[in-house]
Image (tube, helix red, strand yellow):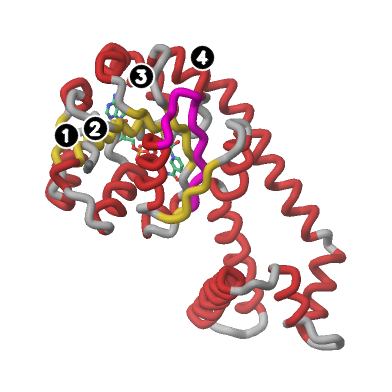
Amino acid sequence: MIANLTFIGAGNMASSLIGGLLAKGYPADRITATDAQPETLERIKNALYINTTTDNLEAVNNANAVILAVKPQSMKAVALELAPALQKRKPLVISIAAGINLSSLEKWLGSGLAIVRCMPNTPALIQQGATGLFANKNTSEADKTLAQNILEAVGLALWLDTENQLDAVTALSGSGPAYFFLMIEAMEQAGIKLGLNEKTARQLTLQTALGAAAMAQGSSDTPEELRKKVTSPGGTTEQAIHSFQQSKFNLIVQTAVEAANARSIGLSSELGE
Ligand SMILES: NC(=O)c1ccc[n+]([C@@H]2O[C@H](COP(=O)([O-])OP(=O)(O)OC[C@H]3O[C@@H](n4cnc5c(N)ncnc54)[C@H](OP(=O)(O)O)[C@@H]3O)[C@@H](O)[C@H]2O)c1
């Protein structure tokens, strides 16, 4: 059976998910999106040919899965508005909102619903996303498969053992694209300082990042083993790695990811009630 999917909020993340689903052959007439902005809906309808409406209640009427894709700050109002309709039909609910716990969603939506919380990241925009998912106890295997299929339309989707791990996912892959952008920026600047022009420095850095990630993904060696293989004794790479290690590179990264994790935990308690 092809499920009817309703997206509440048709912004960046919802558009990426819908775009990914359509690219994988999901029928457009089985997808409905709502938004507070009629212009946003007009844009998405013209680009993706899905059903659109500004009426959230009408949109969930026929849904097998409802994807809550509004900003975390809007989530409570949206959940309270949808609660009676969702309780009547009990579709699968998927929340992509950062920092909104299952306990808050269960409080606002009422008990007994199957709810999956997940944390995608921005490369979902180009179907290269990475998502962590966690389901509440009401979620059946069929619901989990549906949630996984939706998130896999835009990249990797991995189930987590505990809800708390979503904070770690937020800190690692949720915020992670920015860490790599920072590294790319720094390498590009270093290349320019050594005499390359900006375009050349950027192209070389980006291709190196892409090549290294693809190599690591396709290899049975660990990243550490791959690093050691390209680090010849007395060579140039060894000098750079030694310099990174002297500056405590791993500790810098660990501290940064822990700061993001702490902020994610803080946001959850701020946004919960
Ligand atoms: N972007 C990311 O990298 C990322 C990563 C992981 C998770 N997420 C999560 O994804 C969610 C959406 O993020 P986004 O970047 O896609 O945000 P966004 O572009 O702002 O999209 C949210 C859309 O929902 C609309 N909206 C607000 N209230 C609504 C309501 N009551 N009914 C229907 N639509 C409503 C908003 O309209 P207005 O503009 O008028 O408010 C906006 O168009 C967030 O909860 C975020 O935490 C995002």
State the mark number for residue 38. Answer: 1
Figure quarter occupied by ligand 1:
top left
Q: Is residue 193 above or below residue 65?
A: below
Residue 105 sits in quarter: top left
Residue 163 x/y as whole percent: 58, 31
Numbered disc 2: secondary structure: loop
Whether disc 3's CB lies below 8 Å from ligand 1 is answered no
Q: Earlier in the sequence, mark 4 or mark 1?
A: 1
Q: Earlier in the sequence, mark 2 or mark 4?
A: 2
Query: Which of the 4 quarters of the picture holds residue 146?
Result: top left
Spatial CA span between label 2 and label 4: 23 Å
Proximity of marks 2 and 1: CB atoms separated by less than 8 Å: yes
Residues packed near mark 3 inside 10 Å, few (<14), some (14 to 19) or many (20 plus): some
Viewer-closest of 221 and 164: 221
Does 22 sit above or below residue 100? Answer: below
Image: magenta residue range = 130-141
The picture quadrant where one finds residue 76 is top left
